[in-house]
Image (cartoon, helix red, strand yellow):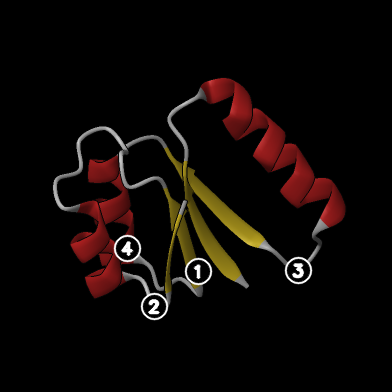
C-alpha cells in the first residue's frame, strides 16, 4: 500500500518512518512537510491513501486539494 503522510514536525516524521519500517512491512510511506509538497507529490505519484492536516502550512483549501488528488481523502 502506498501512503503519503504530510507532517511538518521533524520529530514525528522520524517516528512515523520507524513505525512504517519496523511494523508495517508492506507499507510504502512517503512523508512530506507542507501542503505544497503534498500537491507536488500527488502530481507525480499515485497513492492509496493520503493523510494530512487541513491546517497544513502552505496549503489553501486543503480539503478540496486533497479530495481532487487523493482518493479516498483522509483528513485529521
Q: Earlier in the sequence, mark 1 or mark 4?
A: 4
Mark in front: 2 vs 3? 2
Residue corresponding to mark 2? 71
State the CA–CA distance, disc 3 to disc 1. Answer: 14 Å
Disc number at residue 26? Answer: 3
Disc number at residue 13? Answer: none
Against 48, is 18 above or below? above
Image spot of residue 62 (x, y percent): 23, 53
Secondary structure under tag 1 reads strand
Q: Earlier in the sequence, mark 2 or mark 1?
A: 1
Please name the residue shown 40% across and 45% down the image.
Answer: 53
Q: Earlier in the sequence, mark 3 or mark 1?
A: 3
State the CA–CA distance, disc 1 to disc 4. Answer: 10 Å
Q: Are marks 2 and 3 in contact (CB under 8 Å)?
A: no
Disc number at residue 42? Answer: 4
The residue sitting at the left extreme is 60
Image spot of residue 56 (x, y percent): 32, 38
Please name the residue shown 39% across and 77% down the image.
Answer: 71
Disc number at residue 49? Answer: 1
Q: Are marks 4 and 3 in contact (CB under 8 Å)?
A: no
Q: Residues within 10 Å of mark 1 (few under 14, many from 20)?
A: some
Number of numbered discs visible in the structure rendering: 4
State the CA–CA distance, disc 4 to disc 3. Answer: 20 Å
Secondary structure under tag 3 reads loop
State the CA–CA distance, disc 2 to disc 1. Answer: 7 Å
42 or 61: nearer the eye? 61
State the CA–CA distance, disc 2 to disc 3. Answer: 19 Å
Image spot of residue 65 (x, y percent): 21, 61
Amino acid at each position: 500500500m502506498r501512503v503519503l503522510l504530510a507532517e511538518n514536525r521533524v520529530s514525528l516524521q522520524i517516528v512515523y518512518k520507524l513505525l512504517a519500517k519496523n511494523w508495517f512491512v508492506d507499507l510504502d510511506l512517503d512523508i512530506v512537510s507542507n501542503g505544497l509538497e503534498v500537491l507536488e507529490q500527488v502530481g507525480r505519484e499515485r497513492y492509496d491513501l493520503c493523510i494530512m492536516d487541513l491546517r497544513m502550512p502552505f496549503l489553501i483549501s486543503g480539503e478540496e486539494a486533497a479530495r481532487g488528488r487523493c482518493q479516498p481523502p483522509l483528513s485529521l
